Amino acid sequence: MVALSAPPPTTIQGGTISALHPDILQNHILTLLDGPTLTAIACASSELHALSAEDKLWQNICTSTWPSINDPTVRSIIATFPSGHRSFFSDSYPLLHHNHHSSSFSTASPECFVSAVDIYYKNVPIFSVVETTETLSDWFKSSPFRVDLLEPKEFVQTWIQHQPSEKELSMKQLEENITLSWILIDPKGRRAMNLSSERPVSVQRHWLTGEVVVKFSTIMAGDGGEKEFVESGVTVCCGEKEGGEVEVREVSMVMNDMEGRNLTGKDGLVILQEALERGERRKGKGGNEGKGRYGEFVERKKERKERMRKFEKALDMVCIGTGIAFLVSFWTFILFR
């Protein structure tokens, strides 16, 4: 849940805002608020808390924030959450922080998980989809963890036009304006979390196709070994067609360890389950916190790679020294026996 301090009572002429008729508050004031503001208002008084708990308010906030959850599958899952859409918003809106692995964590694997994904350009949705991934098959458990939302030759046309001054689709144009939400839902556990950094952590142009590759990332605790930290990375590939319109050609998610190796479905599912249950949800700072955490992860990878390089170099020296000592001993034995 989002922890917020209680604001002082807001006064109007003749008393506090709580003195207004409940119908006026609920139908004409609270409906104008966004999720974080509504959460803060609920802390002001017991009356406002009761009015703010109305599920219809939170349903409107959730569906306007994430158009993908209008899908019937997602609606039926949210209905099972302890407080309905309010619980879903509390799980899904803040950034996920999961920095500490627990060796004692144990939970039954879900039969599936549901991804509700929305991509925005200048805060206007350009792509929304819901994908269900089954998790019980041996194929899923042994294969690299990967979720693809588009087929290889499939694309989604958008209304985005590339800047006329640019010969090609501008990386800066996308970096400044594109945002993403990838909500992972566990229907069995009735929990959800957002696996996106909200804003891109990197934007690059593909050397061969010329497509702009936009990357989003969430860093989570691994198992303490080679998977000390794990990256859940979302890739969005955008290309330009004749006429200047921009197409979304790939939306996918993978999970990598500190060595850059893909996690298997089995390993990835364990980490996601622990993050769902024990990860903290915190409000982001200006939309750049996810990028900062990704930068720290990249630095850790570089440090780990440097340590491994020094260790391998020392091991090589030991092996060379051992080999030389063996040769000297062997020829000494042969010549002086």
Image (cartoon, rainbow, N blue to C red):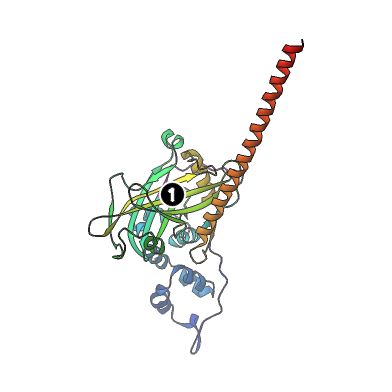
Circle 1 SS class = loop
Q: Main secondary structure of the magenta part?
A: loop
Residue placed at 53% from the left, 55% from the top?
A: 295
| Residue furthest right in the image | 336
> x and y percent of residue 188 in the render?
46, 47
> x and y percent of residue 45 in the render?
54, 75
Count the labels in the image: 1
Q: Residue 313: within the magenta? A: no
- Residue 277, visible in the rendered structure: no
Label 1 amino acid? Pro
| Residue furthest left in the image | 243
Residue 303 relative to residue 266: left or right: right
> x and y percent of residue 67 in the render?
35, 60
Label 1: which residue? 187
- Residue 261, visible in the rendered structure: yes
Residue placed at 53% from the left, 45% from the top?
A: 271
* Relative height, residue 331 to residue 293 (above, below): above
Q: Residue 113: within the magenta? A: yes
Q: Quadrant of the C terminus?
A: top right
Q: How dense is the environment of label 1, judged by Cα within 10 Å: few (below 14), some, or many (20 and up)?
A: many
Residue 333 relative to residue 287: left or right: right
Magenta region, residue range = 102-114
> x and y percent of residue 296 in the render?
56, 54
Q: Nearer the viewer, residue 303 or 136?
A: 303
Q: Nearer the viewer, residue 166 or 198?
A: 166
| Residue furthest top in the image | 337
Residue 237 relative to residue 226: left or right: left
| Residue furthest bottom in the image | 14
